[in-house]
Amino acid sequence: MSLTGTQQGLKNTPWKICNYCRENSSFKSPRDFSQHLRDFHCSKEGGSYVCRYGMNGVCPSLPLEGVSDRDYDDHVLRDHIHSNYGGARGKIMPRRSHERTESQSNGNSDPNIVQDQYKWTIHNATVNLPALLNDPRLVKRETDFFTKTWGQSFERVEILPSPYVPEIGPEHFEKYIRKTSVRLKKHSRTKEKLSSASQSDGREMQPSAQLRQMDQNRAELDQIKLFMSAHFNLENPDIFNTVFPWTQIEESHVSTGQGDQRQSSKLLQEKLSHYLDIVEVRIARQISQKSDAFFHAMASHDELQEKLNNTVRCIKRLRECISVVNEKMAKESLKVLKLSRTRANYMALFNKLKIMASIHETQPTIQRLLSNNEFIGSLDLISTSQDVLTKDLAGIHSFKHLGSQLAEMEVLIDKMLQADFSRSVTSELNRPVIDTVQLAEEERLVSILFGMLRQNKFNFIDVYREEAFTALKAIVKQTVVEAVAIAEDIDTENATSLADQMRLLNYAQWMKLLQAVFRNIMVLLNRVKAFYGVVSDVVGIAAGKTKAPVACNGSSEEDSGDLNEPEHLHVSVSDDVDVMISEAEYEKVKAGLKEMLSAICDYAHDRCVKVMSARAKDGFLERLSSAEFVGLSREIEVFVADTELVCGRKSMSLRGVLQTQANKFVARFHEERKTKLGLILDNERWKQADVPTEFQDLVNHIVDSGNLTLPEKRSDSESRPTECLKVGEDEFAVVGTVLMLIKMMMEYCQCVVDIPTATPDLLTRLIDLLKMFNSRTCQLLIGAGARQMVGLKTISTKNLALASRCLQLVVHFIPQVKDHFEKTLPAKNSNMLKNFEKIVKDYDDHIEEINHKLVTISDNMAEAQLSKYEVKAPMPSQCFRTICKQLSKLHEALIGILGLTHIRTLFTRMNESFLRQLSRRLVVLGVTNDGGPQYGLVISDLVFYSGSFNTLKGLEGLVTDTNSVWDLR
C-alpha cells in the first residue's frame, strides 16, 4: 500500500494505532484501543478521570479537571475512536503521522527546522464546540458564549413549525415497522452470535508478549515523565532509586553470575543513554525552533560591543582635552579671583572697625540729647544704632549687651512720652468751660505726638478717648449740681442722691438744666474737634501727605505741590521731618481718629440719656403733654444736629431714647383709646344714634379744610343733635361707637403733626385700632355675639344695615388718613402704607358679607313660602302676597339707613335669587311656558310681584322682565 493510502486508512480508522507511544502498537478492534488509552493515557484524580492522549500528555478535547467514568468512555469513543470530525486531533494527527512516516523513511533522527515548524504547540490547542456546550460543569464556565454578543434571544429560541413540512407521528411508521420487524429480529440474533464469537476468539488469541510490551511502554513513559517533572531531584532517594534501579542489579548479583551482572549494568547504561538521547533530541528541536533568536542575539551583542569600544575611546579623548583646558585657562583665572576676594575682605573689615568706633559713642550721645529734651533725635539715633548692630555688627561679642541697653533707653523714652501726653490731655480737657481757647498747649502737644508716631505708639488715641470720657462725665455732673443748687422751691434734705434731687425739678427747671448740659457738652466736643484736627495734620506730615508749616521768614517754595496744606496746625514744624509711618498705618490712624471722635460724641449722648433716664424714672416724661413733649423733642434734635456737625455721622442713642419715650407716649395713647373703643363696642346695642354737634363740626372741618386735625371747640349751646351724620352730600345713619372711632382717627392724625418721628408707630397703632373695630363688629353681628353681650334677642336686618353703613363711613375717611400719614412717613417705611389698602379690602369684604347675609335672609323667607306654592286660583296667590309683604317690610327697615343705590343693588340680587328659586319650583310642579292655564296663572303672580316693587322708594322699575324664570331651567 502506498503512503497516501496508509494515511487515508489511519484517518478513517484512528483506533488502529497509538500515535503517542514509543512503539506504534496496532490494535484489532476499538475496544482494544479504548483499553490501551485507559491503561497508558489516563490518570485518575480522586473520583475523576483525566485523558492524557495528546501532545505533552494533554488531551485537546477534554478538560483538565476530569470527568466521570461514563463521561470518559463517551469521550474516548467520540473523540479518539470515531474522530472523523476533524478538530484539534484531526488537524494534528495526519500531520504527525506524515512526519513520522517521512522520518522513518529517511532513517534520520536529527532535528529538522523545516519539519519542526509544523510541530504541535500550545497555540494549536482547541476544544470542539459540542464538548464546550455539553460541559457537565457549565456553572463554572462561561454560560453566555453566544448571548453576550448576540443578545438573550439568540439561544433557546422557539422555532416555528414550517408550513411546508407535515408533522410526522408514530402512525406514519406502523406499516414499515410491521414489514421490517421480522427481519430486524433475525438480524439481531445473528449479530449477537457473531459478537460473542469474536470476543471469545480475541481473548484466546491475545498473546502474552503484547501484554509485556504494553507494560514496558507504560514503564518507559512514566520514566520519561519523571525526568520532565518540575520536582526532579536525584538527592531524593526515591527518585534516585527509580532512575538507578540498583536493587535489581543486586538481586541479579545474588542469583546469577558475573556475566549476568555485567549484562544488567550494560542494559541500565543503555537505558540511561537512551533517555539522554531523547532529551538531547528534544533540546535540539527547541534550539532549532529558537535559532533565529540566537543568531539575532549574537549579532546584537557584537554590535553593542563595538559601540562600547567607540564610546570608551571618545571619553578618553574628552578627559585629555579637559585636563589641558584646566591647566592652561582655569587655574590662573581662579587665582586672580582669590586675590580680589581677599582684598574685598580687608576693605570690609576696615569699614566694620570704623562702624564699631561710631557705635561705641552712641550711649553718651543719647544722654546728651535726652538732657536737651530732643526725643525725636534720641529715638532716631537708637533706631539707627540698633539697625547697625543687627545688620553690620551682628555677632560682635563686645557689643552683645549694647542692643539690650538701647532697648531699655527706648522703653524709658516711651514711658516719658506717655506720661507727658496724659498730663497734657488732662489739663487741656479740664479747663473751665468759659475759656474760649480750643487748644491751649498746641506746640507741646505736637512735639509729643511726633515722638509717639516715631515709636509707632498709636495708643494715644485710646488714652485721649478715656480722658474725654472722664471729662464729659465730670462736666455733666457739675452742670446738674449747679442747676439743683440754684433751683427754687425744692427740698433737697430728703433726697440723698443727685438723681433724686434732679427729679424734684419741675418741667421748666429741668428743661433749663438740659439746655445747660447740652451747651457745656458742645464746648467740650469743640475742644475734641480741635484736637482731632491737629492730630490729623501731624499724622499727615508724618506720613508724607501734608506739608510741614514753617515760619514766615523761612518759608520756601519747593517741590511740594502734591502735598496738602495743614488746616488746623498753627505751630511751625521742621521741614526735614522724615516719613515715620506707612500708608497702611496712616489709614489706620485716620480711621482710629474718626472712630474716637464718633465714640466721644456717642458717649456724650449716653450721658445725656442718663440724665433723661434718671428724670423719667417716676413717669415724668410719659405725663408730658403733647406741647411739652414737642418742646423736649426740638431741644434734643438741635443738640443731635450739632453733634453730627462735630463727628460727621448720626448718633442714635439720644434720638433712640427720644423715640422710646415717644413710643411709650404713643403706646399709652393707643392703649387708652383701644380700651375705650372696646368698652363702647361691648355695650353697643346697634341702634341708630343721634349725631352730637361736636362730631358734625369735626366732619365739617375735615370736609371744608381738608386737614385731618381736631378743630377748636365752640361754645354754641343752641345747636341740637341731628339724626344722621352729613359728610358732604351723603348722609350716614350711624351708631355712637363709629362716631367715637372717627374722633379717635383724627386724634391719631393730630399726634402725627405733633410728633413726626412717631409716625410709623402711630400708623401701626391706628391700623390695629381699625382692625379691632372691624373684627369686633363682625363678631358681635355676623357671629351674633351681641346677643350675649347686650342681650339682643335677634340680630335684625336693621342692625346689619347700621353696621354696614358704619363700615362705609370709616372706609370713606381711610384714603384721606393715608394721604395725611404719607406726608410725614419716612421713605424707608413707605411700604407701610399698603396696610391702608389691606384694611380697606377687609372692610369691603365685611360689607359684602353683610350684604350676603341680608340676601340670605330674603332667600330663606322666599324658600319657605315657595315650598307651599301651588299654581291655582285665586290670583295673586297667597304665597306671592306674603313674599311681596316681606320684601316691603325689609325695604322699610333699610330705607332709612342705607343709601338708595345700595338698597337697589341689594334688591336686585334678591330678585335674581328669587327667580331662580321660583324656576326650580315650577320645574317640580311641571309648569312650562306652553300658554296653558297654569302658565297664565304663573304670569298673573309674576305681574303682581313686579308691580309690588314700583310702590317701594328707589326700586321703581327694578323688575321688568319676568320671562327669565323660564330661561333659568
Image (tube, rainbow, N blue to C red):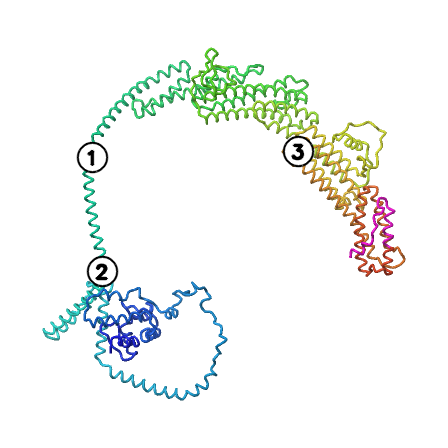
Res. 760 mark: 3
The image quarter containing residue 699 is top right
Task: Name the residue: 85% across, 30% down.
Answer: 719
Q: Considering the image in quadrants, where does the C terminus appear?
A: bottom right
Q: Find the magenta span and give its range.
A: 941-969
Q: Is the residue marked by circle 1 packed among few (<14), some (14-19), or many (20+) residues within 10 Å?
A: few
Q: Secondary structure at mark 1?
A: helix
Res. 325 mark: 1
Res. 291 mark: 2
Circles 1, 2 touching at the beta carbon (< 8 Å) = no
Q: Considering the image in quadrants, where does the N terminus appear?
A: bottom left
Q: Is residue 633 above or below residue 323?
A: above
Q: Nearer the viewer, residue 261 or 789?
A: 261
Task: Kindly report the distance in space between the C-alpha atoms of the residues bearing marks 1 and 3.
Answer: 97 Å
Question: How far across and down, in percent of the image, does residue 700 sit?
Answer: 79, 32
Q: How many marks?
A: 3
Question: How far across and down, in percent of the image, does residue 656 sit?
Answer: 61, 29
